[in-house]
Image: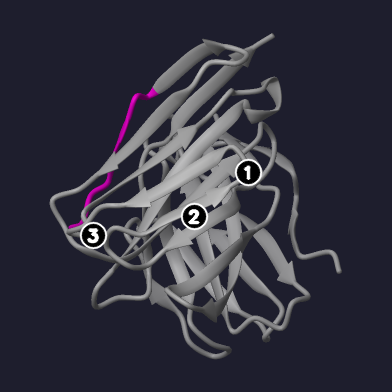
Amino acid sequence: TQLLEQSPQFLSIQEGENLTVYCNSSSVFSSLQWYRQEPGEGPVLLVTVVTGGEVKKLKRLTFQFGDARKDSSLHITAAQPGDTGLYLCAGRGEYGNKLVFGAGTILRVKS
Amino acid sequence: NAGVTQTPKFQVLKTGQSMTLQCAQDMNHNSMYWYRQDPGMGLRLIYYSASEGTTDKGEVPNGYNVSRLNKREFSLRLESAAPSQTSVYFCASSEVGRGGDTQYFGPGTRLTVL
């Protein structure tokens, strides 16, 4: 069974601070996705990374896929209260079409 | 487009009762999924349907059944609800893109089993 471990589980920071969320596994993934979920809603896809070492930027969010395709990180620069939510990473195995989700990181940005 | 819709939004059941969660998508996607979300455990796949007429078990299928009624609709049935099935249930549909499927989620059904 492929597992994805996210850290930290919970993060509470002040507006304007930077933060990084990590997603790690001992398994290789063909692709990795990051989702953001707000209370009472379903997850919404932020990004998909496919190539080892790939870096993608989405405004103040930077996503990186590890060289060995076993880990990923999400870095937020100058966090805003609107970034508050649950961040989930999800990996797709090399031979399957199902996603495996991490447990999530709850981010709270205080103004 | 409404995207993925789920009914009901909330439900309270007594142990042993049955119910069906409904899901529909209007994006003409082939694949549909049912997940449950529990605190500290992320999303776990219950069942999925790669195309109309096919269904397959996911990680936690016990106690559930599904029906892919047509391309748009995918229902999840609890035949005899148990307290361990208290959870938030999400339906999703997907389209194939670079790197695989992009999944679109519904707003969820919050189920409590007493």
Q: Is residue A9 above or below residue B74?
A: above
Q: Residue furthest right?
A: B1
**Same chain for the residues at labels 1 and 3, yes or no?**
yes
- The residue to which callout 1 is attached is A59
Which mark, by number, is residue A69? 3
Q: Amino acid at mark 1?
A: Lys
Is residue A2 on the magenta stretch?
A: yes
On the question of residue B17 being in view, the answer is no
Residue B21 on image: x %, y %: 65, 58
- Boundaries of the magenta span: A1-9
User: Mark 2–mark 3 contact, CB under 8 Å?
Assistant: no
Residue corresponding to mark 2 = B35
Q: In the rendered image of this protein, does residue B87 appear above or below residue B106? A: above
Q: Earlier in the sequence, mark 1 or mark 3?
A: 1
Q: Quadrant of the C terminus of chain A?
A: top right
Q: Nearer the viewer, residue B80 or A58?
A: A58
Task: Calculate the distance from the C-alpha at mark 2 to the C-alpha at mark 1.
Answer: 30 Å
C-alpha distance separating marks 1 and 3? 23 Å
Residue at 48% x, 48% y is B36
Query: In percent of the image, x 52 and y 23: which residue is there?
Result: A107
Local crowd size for mark 2, using a 10 Å CA cut-off: few (<14), some (14–19), many (≥20): many
Residue in view at x 32 percent, y 67 percent: A51
